[in-house]
Image: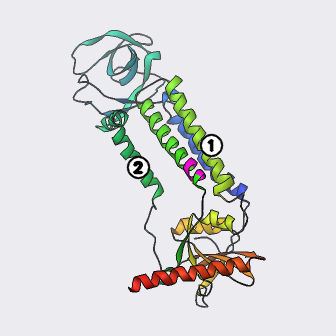
Amino acid sequence: MPKHSARQHPNGARRFKAWVPVSALFILWLVFLAPTQIGGPVSLGVVKGTSMQPSLQTDDLVVAYEMPSYRIGDVIVYDKFGGSIVHEIVGAPNIGVFRTEGIHNNHLDSWNVRTSDIRGKVLFVIPKLGGFFVLLGTNPLFAGAAGVLVAAGVLLPSRKPKYSERLKNLLIHSAQEQRRIKPSAALVITLLWVLVIASIAATVLQLIQGLPLFPRVSWSLVAMSTAFAILIGFWEFNGDGRNLKEPSRSIAVLGPVLRRIPGDVQVETSNVQVVELPSAYKLRDVKEHLNLPVLHQIQLKPVVHSFYVVTDELIYVWRVALDNQSTVADSEDQHLRRVLSTERNNRDE
């Protein structure tokens, strides 16, 4: 829960603090968990064939880790004949040279394996998961359905919000208020998200298939990075309200969907503590932490836009005071009353 006396930090400093752990995690992933194609120590492979039964079955996903040295008994993934093979080391006739065998074959492989050919030692196996990735790569319809499920898992709320009785009563007097985005901008955003999801899926599938970094994997990474950069730029300069004036800036920060309440509805009461927040960004933090809607109310003469997050014990508010907008605010409030009156009449009928 935010402290009532929380100090306002500059937005740049807040974003810097948020990016520090993200950057640290990315560096740790790159050093310890990234695939070998992009300089990391991890290799993924899908088992095909029966040479390693019963230990490995067709469509198992194997995860191999690059080691400083290998010894007899290690199950390794190595490159040979333009592909990858998962076999066990059964001999080491010379330094840096190994003999391998599929445990189901009962005969040695006819070739030698050098240390430079080895992608890593198999650390663990995930049964049948490799078949799922193969299906993604060969069935576009299945891949699209999987992408929709992943996107829904990311975008849907992580937990069900808990609405207080006070909030439920206020929502009865509210109507949906959504920030208007130009159709061209919405189309560009949608296309960028499609590009991001498609490039991530293509990159993962290519890494699992063991394809080299150049050219296909690198092009997928470039596409993914470019789309992410454009989306971040849009968020910083448009979605975060940087190029907008108040109250549109606060609506952009707290939106895209708010619940609008008429000015004559009492939100703040004497028996509930009101916490004044120093910025729309602070209120957004509260909104995201509690997973609750933001209420928007306009008081007239003078014009003050109040944005609320309402809980059982506290009411969090961010206010924006404006001049010379009483006529616009009054017309908006009258329109809202007409909308709510029509909705109530429809419910009564």
Q: Nearer the viewer, residue 322 or 35?
A: 322
Dot 2 and dot 1 residues touching (CB under 8 Å): no
Q: Residue at x 58, y 38 (%)?
A: 225
Region in magenta:
184-188
Where is residue 304? Give x, y as percent. Answer: 71, 79
* Residue 186 forms part of the magenta stretch: yes
Q: Nearer the viewer, residue 122 or 152?
A: 152
Looking at the rendered structure, the kind of residue marked 2 is Val
Q: Number of numbered discs present?
A: 2
Other residues around mark 2 within 10 Å, as few (<14) / some (14–19) / many (≥20) = few
Where is residue 259? Give x, y as percent. Answer: 55, 74
Where is residue 269? Give x, y as percent. Answer: 60, 89
Where is residue 314? Give x, y as percent. Answer: 57, 80
43 lies above or below 159: above
Other residues around mark 1 within 10 Å, as few (<14) / some (14–19) / many (≥20) = few
Task: State the residue position of label 1.
Answer: 229
Task: State the residue position of label 2.
Answer: 148
Is 191 displayed left or right of 249 in the figure?
A: left
Q: Residue at x 21, y 21 (%)?
A: 104
Is 71 displayed left or right of 242 in the figure?
A: left
Residue 266 visible? The answer is yes
Q: Residue at x 60, y 38 (%)?
A: 226
Looking at the rendered structure, the kind of residue marked 1 is Ala
3 lies above or below 169: above
213 lies above or below 171: above
Residue most extreme to the right: 323
Is 211 displayed left or right of 177 in the figure?
A: left
* Residue 266 forms part of the magenta stretch: no
Magenta segment, principal secondary structure?
helix
197 lies above or below 298: above
